[in-house]
Amino acid sequence: MIAADANDNNGGDDEPQNPNDGVSISSSTPSASAPEVRNPSHARRNLIHDNVHHQHRISPPASSPHRHRRQSKVRGNTLPLIALSLAIALMAALNFLNRGQQTMVHGDMQLQHSRGDDNDVLSTIIRKRSSERQRIEELEQQIEKLQQKNERLTHELSSVLHSSAMSKSNNIMQRYVNSFWWPSLDSSSGLLAKLSSLQNPSDCSSPRTKFMIWRSGLEPELDNRGLTAWAHTATWHMLHALTDGDQFDIHGSRVLLQDDKLWPMAKGCQRGPETRECYFEPLSKCKLSDADPITSNNATKAYILKNHNDDYDRTIRTIYTARTAWWRGTNDVYAWTGLSGGTKVNSELTLTAAMFAYYFNPKPWLREEIHKRLQVSIPVDLNPDRSIGVPIRRSDKCMGHDIEGSAAGEMVCSSLDEYLDGVKSFVAFDPSIENVIVTSEDKAACGEFVEMLKKELPALRVVVNVGDVQQGTGSGAKLESYTEGSTNAAVVASALTSMHMHMRARYFVITSVSTWTSTVTFMARAYGFATSDVFVIDLMKKNNRLASLARNGCQCKRWR
């Protein structure tokens, strides 16, 4: 349609000239006899056809007088075509507009529908985001709790590593040589666990729970027994209670409790009662109030032993020891353990060391105090396998001393030259020895011996208990009175630090007449840091149980 309009406007003026210009080849008008065209589209095609013929085949020259007439005739014939084309175009436009309106309406409907869908999607997204936000908040809360738990566990782990309060292991990383370590009573197996279980029954108030109350002497404030002498006594009372006087198979065990009378070494205690529990954990979670009172009129409830060998009715719920310094001996010391064979096949060293470990289980403040002292006394690179321990016991242990308030001397103390000879013997035996750990309650003797070592064996490193009170006696009745400004707590902490220091040695020069040096040595055998066998030179032998355990690691002869 647009092409026809363009050709109409041009009128054929741009067509090339024909050589036969002016010669009529065919008529330019439609035939009179041509049938009527009823179909407008057919008429349109015929008109276009005729017009094309006029344009391309009737080309009068520019000067021809017929040109104007012919052009007018052609234009006249194109008017209906133009009108028809306009009508068609108008109809098409109207149709387009109509379709556009329908499309717009449909589009509006789709848009509304789409908006509805978008609203649903948006609502869903909002709900999901709200749910995710809530989940994120929950996760953040869980993370915060985990962080708090992690901080708590880290703190606990740091505390455990700091105090080294864990079970014994051959892994040196678990037992730092210059940190506190003690056998754990929380272990789920072994003698310590069995002992702790029997001493801490599930129901202390039950009529079936029986007790043995260890009573102090008539004048407890004058009791001059030292730390290890008390522990030795406690071991035998504990065996008495655990076996119920060698009748475990028939009557089972009793719980050992200690009375609440003054413990001389706890005088002036600032951290608890003036009893053993100033320094050490209770022997049991059970209390004296759980036992039957000594004043009970019921003979089936309470009984007081007349002496340490007094026999008694095992069905009585609570028995009280005689107020003497002695104890009842136990024949089958392994009966309560459930292990067969007794001391014939089981180690008495292990049993005794476990009981001492139970008795000497320090309270947290004392653990921390010992730890601090070890940190400044023991070199971090000290090798226990290359160390000699020399716990010198002198002062009130020597006969003829004039220390007021202390126990009478019981031995002719060995000279410091004898101690030095013992050290030289070990160095000759093991040239790899590097350290000598020297401790003593006697300040003068300790200082003199250190100087002897530096002169005679300068290649050895001498390790001493830094800050040791060195009160000048091993007696417990007046510990605080021998050193100006000292306290019982400081003396006990110093003494126990010395014991812990010697647990870092392999070779020992001792006098087994002293319960203290014997205890130091057999505890090193059982729980020490050395990875090889322990060797002992005993300058002054005593034939008793603890001395034998110290020298040989076993009680090779009963009671010797």
Image: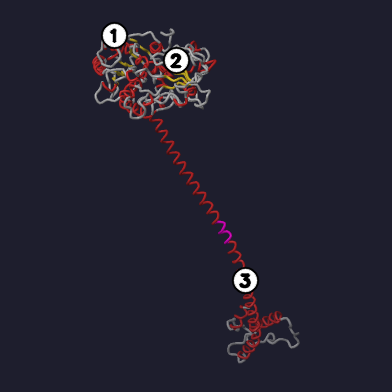
Observer-side mark, 2 or 3, equals: 2
Percent position (x, y) of residue 221? 33, 20
- Residue flagged by tag 3: what amino acid is it? Val
Give the secondary structure at mark 2.
Answer: loop
Task: Report the predominant secondary structure element of the magenta stretch.
Answer: helix
- Residue flagged by tag 1: what amino acid is it? Val
Check the image and tell me how it is coloured: secondary structure
Percent position (x, y) of residue 271? 35, 30
What is the C-alpha distance between the residues marked 2 and 3? 113 Å
Give the secondary structure at mark 3.
Answer: helix
Q: Magenta segment range?
A: 118-125
Residue at mark 1: 412
> Quarter of the image containing the C terminus?
top left
Q: Quadrant of residue 537?
A: top left
Give the mark nearest the N terminus, 2 or 1: 2
Residue 435 can be seen, yes or no: no
Tell whether label 1 touches label 2 (CB within 8 Å): no
The label on residue 105 is 3
Residue at mark 2: 305
State whether residue 434 is above or below residue 127. above
